[in-house]
Amino acid sequence: MKITKKKPDSEFLIVGGGISGMAMALLLAAAGRSVTLLEKSAVVGGCMQRFVRDGIPLDTGFHFTGGFNHGLPEMLAVLGLHDDIREEEFRTHIFLADRLKKVSFSTAGVKDVCDHLCSLYQDEAAAIQEYYTVERRIFDSTPIFKLREKSLSEMFYLMDEDFITLDDFFNKENISQELRTILGAVAMCHGTPPCEVPLTTHCRISFGLTDHISRVCGGGGSFISGFQREAGRMGINVRTGVTIAECLDIDDSVCHRVRLTDGSELSFVSCVMSLHPMEMLKILPASMISPHFRSRISSFEESCGFFSLYAEITPPLPDFRQELTSWLSVCDLNKILKPGNSTESGMGIVLAHETTDDGRPCQTLTAFESMFPDETARWDKTSTNRRDEGYAEYKARRIETMKAKVTQAYPELRNKLRVMESASMLTFRDYLSTSGSGYGIRQKIGQHNLFGRLPVNNFYAVGQNAILPGMLGSMVSSFVIFRRLIGENSYWRLIEQRLGKL
Ligand SMILES: Cc1cc2nc3c(=O)[nH]c(=O)nc-3n(C[C@H](O)[C@H](O)[C@H](O)COP(=O)(O)OP(=O)(O)OC[C@H]3O[C@@H](n4cnc5c(N)ncnc54)[C@H](O)[C@@H]3O)c2cc1C
């Protein structure tokens, strides 16, 4: 690696302060490296950010996660965040709106879920068992969740199931439409339809969420405050409201100096970008981008987006429990997740306990319903708080139809929802990510995601678009690339220091 003669300002430059950028910055600093993190918004956190309405904290892009019994506690310990993140009990249901049918899931693990579904769909019990056997095998053969995996190269072996879609599996097992919808409902948590998503990708996300789903006390805010404390303690230079304007001195396919949007310059040894691929394309120097690389990025398509509604449940329900109901308009996830489709939809309804800023306990409902950009195309060129009356009317209509769908699944909530806020894909686009989609790019079969080294050879890609979307998938991408960047000896030193010897 070629290094400029003068000592660089930072060994590592991280661009993007979402969960993947924050995790990468903490890992590198914990390994004793100097780190600067650039975040173009005024605050760090990306989709982990919360906001407050009427004193009530509300989540933007992080409501629940899997992983608390599969690697997440170890990752948090390595990041120094184990005391910040407290898991809370959470349960799940699926509501099939076209059949007015609710299926509730056990919280006692995949085996219980499998047994329960076998009892509900006795004619298809063999196919259900086969699905969960395959799902577990895929998860167990995926070493990226295991920090003590000895061989990094094992992480990148393709499995037979990488070459078939979730739908191919359902077709092979001749699974009914209703059961496909139930087994595949986690597609709403990665945003790629069963006809496109590799079986491996779906199962890696689905296994964790089915086996043990949790909410985090304080939501994404607890990750952000933990990051801020650790960043301060370890001397990470966090710069918000600024990003790379131009790469300077590109030589021999590397770049060690950039000009920032505030006019200052910064030198570094390596740069990690935790951004949407389109955003990376804007930063990488045009001279280094081959037509092939550009067309690879333009071939990526976006996952679904969401229209979100935030409400307080008032008066509070007596027997309230934190939970997720996946409301699905029709038993066809391909229709629901088909871009441009505006007739069918899926909606996550999250009931949660919160505490207001003056200490009052309250109950909240966040509902996020799938949507695609064409729905708000008229207002594409406008920005938040500067949209016309038509947009306000569109949102008001959307809120009313969502409330009707929510009360279909929860009749007890009729007349109890005090709506505090709503957000379309455009709001998410303006505040959070380039496209406003829920999970970045769609994870299509045969696709070659941007992960690891980029055409500028000391630049690397991580984040939700790299391996798996979601908080955990984004964080995992940083662990994998971190290990590569600092080498095996330093990696194992940190793991043993933070987790102890095996
Ligand atoms: C409505 C919604 C609900 C969701 N629910 C869940 C959930 O319940 N559980 C779950 O696990 N996942 C959920 N997700 C997905 C999850 O939030 C994301 O997969 C994950 O947080 C992505 O993390 P990231 O670090 O890759 O990207 P981001 O969080 O998008 O972070 C990227 C950061 O980079 C910054 N940035 C962008 N461009 C630049 C630039 N040029 N220079 C510098 N900085 C830049 C952005 O401002 C942002 O802060 C949800 C997403 C949405 C939208």
Image (spheres, rainbow, N blue to C red):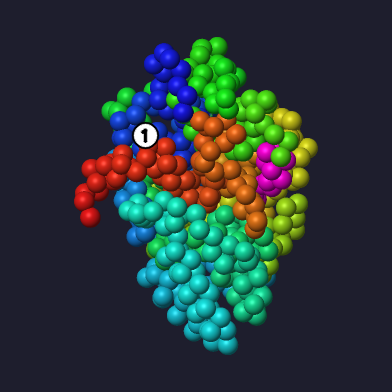
Q: Position of residue 367 (x, y in %)?
A: 56, 52
- Return the residue at label 1: 28
Front one among 186 and 131:
131
Under mark 1, the amino acid is: Leu
The vertical placement of 230 against 154, above or below, is: above
In which quadrant will I find the C terminus? Answer: bottom left
Residue at horizontal 57 percent and vertical 54 percent from the top? 190
Does residue 418 belong to the magenta stretch? no
Label 1: state its secondary structure.
helix
Q: Position of residue 12 (x, y in %)?
A: 42, 28
- Mark 1 is surrounded, within 10 Å at the Cα level, by few (under 14), some (14 to 19) or many (20 or more) other residues, namely many
Q: Position of residue 396 (x, y in %)?
A: 68, 44
Left/right of residue 495 with respect to residue 288 in the rendered view: left
The vertical placement of 125 against 131, above or below, is: below
Picture quarter containing residue 298? top right
Residue at horizontal 57 percent and vertical 45 percent from the top? 465
Residue range highlighted in magenta = 293-304
Is the residue at mark 1 in contact range of ligand 1, meaning its CB lies under 8 Å from it?
no
Q: Position of residue 231 (x, y in %)?
A: 34, 30
Front one among 110 and 305:
110
Front one among 419 and 217:
217
Residue at horizontal 34 percent and vertical 60 percent from the top? 69
